[in-house]
Image (tube, coloured by chain):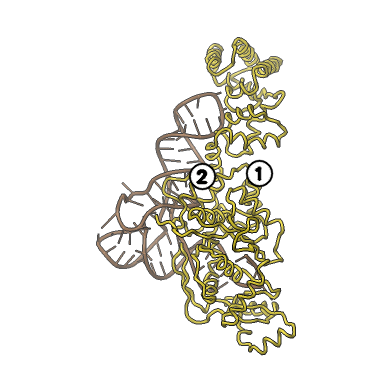
Chain colours: A yellow, B brown
RNA sequence: GCCCCCAUCGUCUAGUGGCCCAGGACAUAGCCCUCUCAAGGCUAAAACCGGGGUUCGAGUCCCCGUGGGGGCACCA
């Protein structure tokens, strides 16, 4: 396996316009894996050149999400580094300088066309079934004209001058060479009339200046990829390795996640945003594993990976260029796997907040026992209170309907409860070893199935149809509670006829 | 409409010309285990988009078609 020998400097460069979602998290994860595998650096850069869409809360959300995933940046706004500042709004001058350089070399030009005019041109072109593109009006302006119009205070942008003849070939690590006709390339805006750079310039300048070796980004950048390479070349820079990740599709495979799908998923208990993962009962180990496998695979067998495994085994070569539909039921599966992989003390700590939120105050010893009883039956942490909350209750409310049926009437049930009570009272310690056989014998004696006795007991102790194993429950609630609950159940059943 | 990318079970995928009458996982169904629910074990059903090439031989290479996705902003 050819691993990247050179330490990779990789950047995760989100735009602070909302919450970090699964797709962004995947990019960040791959960035982290590549950086750590090669002993390079994982850089966080905030791309906030669009003040209209800016959301202040975003940066904290990204930070929190990465922290939760356990993938901290090595360099970034918070941790600093030798290539800062790491926030693009603080690098405006740098982009301007490079835009000027491109103008001087003839690779960019000033453009005074108004937004209205541009829109009109686009409408025309669309009507004629052409690809909307800049019509080149300002390409031939003389330096004098330009100086004059700037002097007059006319707003302007700086556009890249895309070549209009020939072809451009760029190389994506997953797809190989991609060649386009230069005639299909547009004169992209580099500097907006507000003086700020747009992505096409800012990201290229930063990637170069920050010595990024691998640009890992979503495939929505494929159409403008040639422009980006051309900007690098126009500046005389050596290109990084380009990796365009496949898009993540919604679960039915039809299109990428939209706002509506996001809400639908939420209603069904599935998270799209990383911030929701924890509240929805998912643990980061599982989420990382799950996310890593959407668009990447290791071999034909292995699917369970810890973060460390991933750092060790990740490789760009095994990335899959085709779009992948999100599969939430697989997330549930991985969550179960990773929960079971936790050691019991760790699991106990993870479930503690859930019981606390429900108003219980579990002692360490009790919590540890509960953990042992429910760990391998937990898929999402959201379930733990439903499964084990009754253990904290003063009393449980039994359902007679679940006990009494045409195979077992109330009188028999009451009798059975009484017998169970006698058996337990006669035992110095109620454990599986010394109680199971007597219970089974009781069932045989009463011509009942063992399941009926255990079902009755379960209802008496838990007030639930489903619960952890009875002999796991008993030591947790203790002998006194066990006896009194059985007695209560017997009393209730005894009053029915 | 134009440009670009992609194409193996319902879904995620293995497969880099013979090891593939295609392997694994999720989900689904059945069975076993079993005090319930899980977990675990076993089994079943389930795919190489179509057509042309190249080759002794194609899921694997090439072309065309079709389908899916992405993009076409002074957003990223």
In this rendering, would A269 be left or right of A29?
right
Q: Total of numbered circles in the picture?
A: 2
> Label 1: few (<14), some or many (≥20) within 10 Å?
some
- What mark, if any, has residue A306 been given in the picture? 2
A11 or A157, which lies in front? A11
Q: Is residue A31 above or below residue B54?
A: above
In this rendering, would B64 be left or right of A376?
left
| CA distance for labels 2 and 1 | 21 Å
Residues under numbered marks 2 and 1 in contact, where contact means CB atoms less than 8 Å apart: no
Task: Residue A311: give x, y in percent of width and height.
Answer: 49, 50
Q: Is residue A310 above or below residue A206?
A: above
One can see residue A334 in this view: yes
Q: Residue at x 55, y 44 (%)?
A: A286
Residue extending furthest front?
A: A82
Q: Residue at x 69, y 24 (%)?
A: A396
- The residue that label 1 is drawn on is A279
Q: Which chain letter goes with mark 2?
A: A
């Amino acid at each position: 396996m050819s691993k990247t020998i050179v330490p990779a400097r990789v950047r995760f460069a989100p735009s602070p316009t909302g919450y970090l979602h699964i797709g962004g998290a995947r990019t960040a994860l791959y960035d982290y894996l590549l950086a750590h595998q090669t002993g390079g650096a994982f850089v966080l850069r905030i791309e906030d050149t669009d003040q209209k869409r800016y959301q202040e809360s975003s940066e904290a959300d990204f930070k929190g999400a990465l922290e939760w995933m356990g993938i901290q940046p090595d360099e970034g706004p918070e941790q600093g580094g030798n290539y800062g500042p790491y926030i693009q709004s603080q690098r405006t001058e740098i982009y301007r300088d490079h835009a000027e350089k491109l103008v001087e070399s003839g690779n960019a030009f000033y453009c005074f066309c108004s937004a209205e005019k541009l829109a009109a041109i686009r409408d025309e072109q669309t009507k004629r079934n052409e690809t909307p593109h800049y019509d080149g009006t300002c390409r031939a302006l003389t330096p004098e004209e330009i100086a004059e119009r700037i002097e007059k205070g006319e707003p302007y942008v700086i556009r890249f001058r895309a070549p209009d003849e020939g072809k451009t070939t760029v190389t994506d690590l997953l797809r190989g060479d991609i060649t386009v006709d230069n005639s299909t390339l547009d004169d992209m805006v580099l500097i907006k009339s507000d003086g700020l750079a747009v992505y096409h310039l800012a990201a290229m300048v930063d990637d170069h200046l920050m010595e990024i070796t691998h640009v890992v980004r979503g495939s929505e950048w494929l159409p403008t990829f040639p422009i980006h390479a051309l900007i690098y070349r126009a500046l005389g820079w050596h290109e990084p390795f380009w990796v365009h990740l496949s898009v993540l599709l919604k679960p039915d495979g039809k299109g990428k996640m939209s706002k509506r799908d996001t809400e639908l998923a939420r209603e069904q208990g599935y998270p799209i945003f990383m911030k929701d993962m924890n509240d929805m009962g998912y643990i980061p180990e599982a989420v990382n594993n799950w996310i890593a496998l959407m668009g990447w695979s290791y071999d034909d067998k292995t699917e369970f990976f810890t973060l460390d495994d991933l750092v060790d085994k990740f490789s760009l070569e095994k990335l899959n260029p085709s779009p992948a539909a999100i599969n939430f039921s697989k997330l549930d599966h991985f969550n179960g796997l990773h929960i079971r992989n936790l050691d019991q003390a760790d699991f106990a700590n993870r479930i503690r907040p859930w019981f606390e939120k429900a108003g219980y105050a579990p002692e360490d010893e009790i919590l540890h026992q509960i953990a042992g009883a429910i760990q391998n039956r937990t898929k999402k942490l959201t379930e733990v209170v439903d499964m084990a909350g009754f253990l904290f209750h003063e009393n449980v409310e039994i359902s007679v309907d679940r006990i009494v049926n045409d195979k077992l009437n109330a009188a028999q049930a009451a009798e059975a409860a009484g017998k169970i009570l006698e058996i337990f009272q006669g035992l110095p310690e109620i454990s599986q070893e010394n109680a199971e056989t007597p219970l089974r014998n009781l069932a045989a004696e009463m011509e009942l199935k063992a399941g009926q006795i255990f079902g009755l007991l379960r209802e008496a102790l838990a007030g639930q149809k489903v619960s952890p194993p009875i002999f796991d429950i008993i030591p947790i609630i203790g002998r006194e509670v066990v006896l009194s609950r059985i007695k209560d159940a017997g009393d209730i059943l005894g009053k029915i006829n």
